[in-house]
Amino acid sequence: MSARTLVGKFAACPPTRIAFGQRQSLRIHLRRPQRCLSSHAPSQVWLARSAALPVFSRTRDFHSSPASCHGGVTRPKPGEGIKVHFKDSKGNLLKTVEANEGDDILSIAHEYDIDLEGACEGSVACSTCHVILDPESYDKLPEPEDDENDMLDMAFGLTDTSRLGCQVRLTRDLDGMTATLPAATRNMFVDEADTSLARVAGAACWDCQNYSSTSHRFM
Amino acid sequence: MAPIKLAVVGAGPSSFYVASRLLSLLPRSGPHASSLKIHLYDRLWAPYGLVRYGVAPDHPEVKNCTHKFDEAATDPRLRFFGNVNIGTTSPFSYALPLSLEALMPYYTHILYSTGCTVPILHPALPPSRYCIPALSMVHWYTQHPSKPSPPPLDRTSHVTLIGQGNVSLDVARMLLTPPDHLAKYDVPMPVLDILRRSAVQHVSIVGRRGPLQAAFTTKELREMMNLPDSSMVPLDPALLAQVQGASLTRQQSRTLQLLQKGSKNKPGTTAKTWSLDFFRSPTGLTTPVSPSDKARLTLAHTTLDPSSRAVPTGESSTLDTDLVITSLGHRSELSAPWYDPALGHLRTVSGRVVNADGRVVRNVYASGWAAMGARGVLASTMMDAYAVVDTILRDHFPGEDVQTTAASGPESAADKAAEADALEVLPKEVDLDAIPPEVEAGLKEGRVTDFEDWRRVDAEEIRRGEELGKERERMDWEEAHNFLTKTRT
Ligand SMILES: Cc1cc2nc3c(=O)[nH]c(=O)nc-3n(C[C@H](O)[C@H](O)[C@H](O)COP(=O)(O)OP(=O)(O)OC[C@H]3O[C@@H](n4cnc5c(N)ncnc54)[C@H](O)[C@@H]3O)c2cc1C
Ligand code: FES
């Protein structure tokens, strides 16, 4: 059996294009936790290469993981839902999807395999579901609550129209909204690490070394 | 593809985030499935690092990330080996000591995710009966295998925390929250017993700089303000007035608003109180002659110089207290390979481990607190982990332009050059399923735990918790070992 048919047969979810190289972009398959084994298009993972490379697919235990459906939301019939555009941190369109009134952005992202984390599963305790909304849509939403603002304080790449995806629920008038993934760079960690020089030497700043993200440094 | 057989030293969140990302980028349904193996080694018998043995019990939502880790562990390409200490000194007698050299021949790739496990001490405040690091408190209330002795809370009415970060506020919250409110969470029964007998009336939280420099986040500060039967000693209005008008970040202005408003319970209405003592730097602790007396903490008063550093004003004061808890951050262990004493963690460039001469060590990586130092919430630990995965894949697929996360940034020419000149320490070809014989023997003996063991303990802890009307009742290693031995078929 060729790699192509193997991959086609056993891929769990549609591919997500999350790589954006200039020369050549890889289509990398991102499997969200506990997804149903859907009949979506086969993954293109490494497919380009797989012709030249040995086949390593295997099927053992494949069906052992529990199957629940994506983000826990149902997809509307095409043309009947509320449209949401997801963009990557550089503003490139990842996907335009449709969802129902009341669905939240995090669940929608999961349903459509957008690479948005949700480490605390919508409990407003992690800020990994941070998205940046287009200003018009942002203004249509009720103000964030204190707890959401507290978590946004710690989010990376915060902007004036940042929200936690798990707290934004769709209404009809948000049709056509854009949710952009935040920009993050490795420098955030590097800059932080530099300050540790002073701290190990017993010098500056011992009152700011605990686990806070001290996000004010990042903005 | 050439195989990636990765040994991860440490099984905290960073390690699991790297593992789950690799497993999903090279999915089981994909063509490279079986050339990827990931083995997680932790010196602790249970997985998840600080998520199990750090995150405060009253923050159960933070621990939801373990669902993703559990999901990753359903992939048969991932294995977990608990109770294996990689390196020379094993802090627990029952953990299997295994040298890095003994591990290396079995793996094509190694990742260090060993975190920052050593608390930084204050030079003027050596540990004693009257002074302990916050990490010991955290280890006590999370029942960490290091088993520190419980704090003498029944004889303690005044506690002083040194440091104003979130760990400090976690400890303060644990001391001031009514134990009945904590009872439903993952707080071990013996810990609740001691909290119920606590005599703590006041917690002073001391920092050597001002409200704008404090490291705690608004969420944690708000929780302090909302404590049900404690109140904050109001701040000197002059202190808050002083910072008005400064150009503030969003977080700073929200912190200031909270400080101005003060605690929900008005001062003077509660028996228990807490205070934020800004611009104070400890210079010494005099222990009492009679054990019934308090210790005396001397504090130098400080102010900020133009570059926002704390400098002494020349004045000082004293504070009588029963227990000083230092919360000044953490560093990696001195004995960790590639440890840089100047940094307090491992030496890395874009996740690649670098030796003392500045040369990249091929296929050896570091992530999480071991690589970036003890700062950052789980969100930053996760982003760093994903960026390290990009580095691993870039090195493995040199022709490709891998970037799966914004955090990894475009690959630089310098990175590529460093990689080309790398030091070789690991084999290219290995038996994909082999593990060191010591580990194999440890598994047979029941001394080394695997993920299935953990799943059983996890389910049992939750079951025991249900009986007691709480989230879970933790086991220590002795109990877990007994339980596993008894129920092993
Ligand atoms: C007290 C405390 C509370 C926190 N609370 C929160 C919170 O509420 N929310 C939040 O977002 N973040 C919190 N954080 C921060 C969060 O815990 C860190 O971002 C994260 O744990 C770092 O992950 P890590 O995997 O790098 O390190 P760790 O979690 O420390 O994991 C390292 C693992 O390596 C193992 N190890 C070390 N050396 C060896 C060796 N030689 N051999 C084998 N194994 C070894 C250790 O046993 C440990 O399990 C908290 C941190 C602390 C200290
Ligand atoms: S998922 Fe954690 S804050 Fe939204």
Image (cartoon, coloured by chain):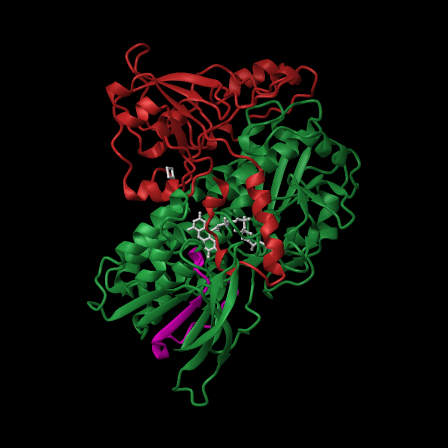
Chain colours: A red, B green
Left or right of B143, for residue B220: left
Ligand 2 visible in quadrant:
top left
- Which portion, as a residue range, is magenta? B145-167
Residue A175, compared with residue B177, is above or below; it is above
Apparent side of residue B489 relative to residue B464 in the rendered image (left or right): right
The quadrant of the image that shows the N terminus of chain B is: top right
From this view, report whether residue B435 is shown above or below residue B43.
above
> Was residue B156 drawn as part of the magenta stretch in this picture?
yes
Who's the residue at 27% across and 58% down the image?
B262
Q: Residue at x 33, y 61 (%)?
A: B238
Left or right of residue B102: residue B487: left
Image coordinates of residue B157 in percent, x first then y, are: 34, 76
Q: Nearer the viewer, residue B32 or B362?
A: B362
B47 and B416: which is toward the camera: B416
Outermost residue to the top: A79
> x, y (%) of residue B424?
79, 41
Query: Does the segment drawn in magenta span residue B209?
Result: no
Locate residue A124, reporting x and y percent.
34, 41
- Residue B60 seen: no
> Which residue occupies 44% across, 44% down?
B66
Q: Say whether residue A50 is left or right of residue A62.
A: right
x and y, in percent, of residue A118 in the image:
41, 36
Nearer the observer, A114 or B97: A114
Total numbered labels:
0
Extreme residue in the left direction: B269
Whether residue A178 can be seen here = yes
Outermost residue toward the bottom in this view: B290
Rendered image quadrant of residue B352:
top right
Can you say whether B460 is above or below B362 in the image?
Answer: below
